[in-house]
Image (tube, rainbow, N blue to C red):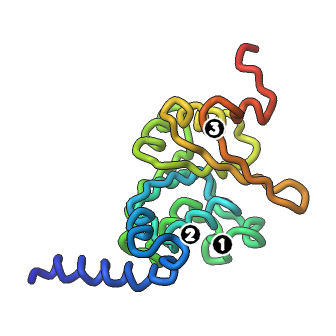
Amino acid sequence: MSVKKLQENLVNENYLERTQRNQFFIGGPEGQERIRNLTVGVAGLGGMGSNIAEYLARLGVENLHLADADTIDVSNINRQVIANFNSVGTRKLDASVAEIKRIAPEANLKPFKEGITAENVYDFVEGCDFIVDEIDVFPIEAHHILHKACRERGIPIYSAYVIGLGVHFYKFEGDQFTFEDFLSINEED
């Protein structure tokens, strides 16, 4: 057996052992295989997004599109799993990729170091089963183009917003209740 085949077998055995405890909750090995084959985009790798990307990798999602243009700074340490004194000054994307690879070396990661832009948004959403929008609150245009691209492609998009001491979780799909409705943005203006 070739060295490459031995490495593939080891990674596969590691995956099955690592995700074994998930199977009780997700429909056994068949459910785990469905999760393994998902492609999920996580836009924004701060306090919520970096945690979500890490949890998806721990759950066994092997295909992740990751986008963030920001850099870790000292003020991030109190709330971001990727932030510590060793990672200050590092791109959030690079820190997330490194952490995910330590958890799940078999993960297929597609990084978008520019964050979400008009130029890359369709490449970011391409092939995704769903998107998690955790872009910082203020770049409204990035949210807008991401949600619009997802609507055009029929891809569900999830967002969680910390409001006061609670978290509000939203699922946007189709035209029933859009991100623009959420922010009372009238596209005709």
Tag nearer the camera, 2 or 3: 2
Q: Residue at x 56, y 46 (%)?
A: 115
Tag of residue 142: 3
Quadrant assignment for the N terminus: bottom left
Bin the neighbour count of mark 2 within 10 Å (Cα to Cα): few under 14, some 14-19, many 20 and up: many
As rendered, which of 86 and 23 lies closer to the eye?
A: 23
Disc 1 target residue = 81
Kind of residue at badge 2? Glu
Disc 2 or 3, which lies upstream in sequence? 2
The answer to whether residue 106 of the structure is visible from this angle is: yes
Task: Farthest residue to the front: give it.
Answer: 27
1 to 63, vertically: above or below: below
Disc 1 or 3, which lies upstream in sequence? 1
Bin the neighbour count of mark 1 within 10 Å (Cα to Cα): few under 14, some 14-19, many 20 and up: some
As rendered, which of 145 and 92 lies closer to the eye?
A: 145
Alpha carbons under labels 1 and 3: distance apart: 23 Å
Disc 2 target residue = 54
At numbered mark 1, what does the secondary structure look like: helix, strand or loop? loop
Give the image quarter of residue 4. bottom left
Kind of residue at badge 1? Val
Percent from the top left, x then y, of residue 111?
A: 45, 54
Label 1 close to label 2 by CB (< 8 Å): yes
Q: Report whether 130 appears left or right of 14.
A: right
Percent from the top left, x then y, of residue 122?
A: 46, 36
